[in-house]
Image (cartoon, grey):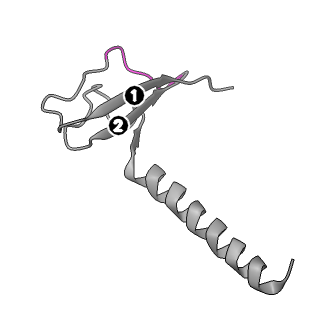
Amino acid sequence: MNAKYLKKYTNLAGSLSLAFLSASVIAGNYTPKDFPDGQLPSNDPNITFTTYDANWVSEIKLPIAPQDHALPEIWEGVCS
């Protein structure tokens, strides 16, 4: 592969990596340590709330006034 194409593919790969990183930063990734009362925030339209052993709440409360098209996701993870 010549240097011209290698540079082109390297730039493309870097751009895609940045796009995936930006998307994961934009999404609100929370755990019970962030909201010990279990109340999810209303100001974040893309919420991922993850619980796992020794980091959980007894009740998870959906946002009180969610934004349009808000999508909360609840995940239960296993911590080994």
Write down the residue under mark 1. 73
Q: Is residue 63 magenta?
A: no
Quick one: quadrant of the N terminus? bottom right
Q: Which SS class for mark 2?
A: strand
x and y, in percent, of residue 54 in the image: 52, 23
- Left or right position of 74 against 63: right
Q: Looking at this rendering, what residue extends furthest in the left direction?
A: 65
Residue nearest the observer in this picture, 26 or 16: 16
x and y, in percent, of residue 17 in the image: 59, 61
- Position of 9 relative to 47 (above/below): below
x and y, in percent, of residue 57 in the image: 38, 20
Q: What residue lies at 70% left-to-right and 73% top-to-bottom?
A: 10
Write down the residue under mark 2. 47
- Are discs 1 and 2 less than 8 Å apart at CB? yes
- Left or right position of 32 against 61: right
Q: Amino acid at mark 2?
A: Ile
- Left or right position of 42 against 28: left
Between the C-alphas of marks 1 and 2, the distance is 6 Å
x and y, in percent, of residue 4 in the image: 75, 85
Q: Quadrant of residue 38?
A: top left
Magenta extent: 54-59
Q: Which SS class for mark 1?
A: strand
Q: Amino acid at mark 1?
A: Glu
Q: Is residue 57 magenta?
A: yes
| Label 1 Cα neighbours within 10 Å, binned few <14 / some 14-19 / many ≥20 | few
Q: What residue lies at 63% left-to-right and 69% top-to-bottom?
A: 12
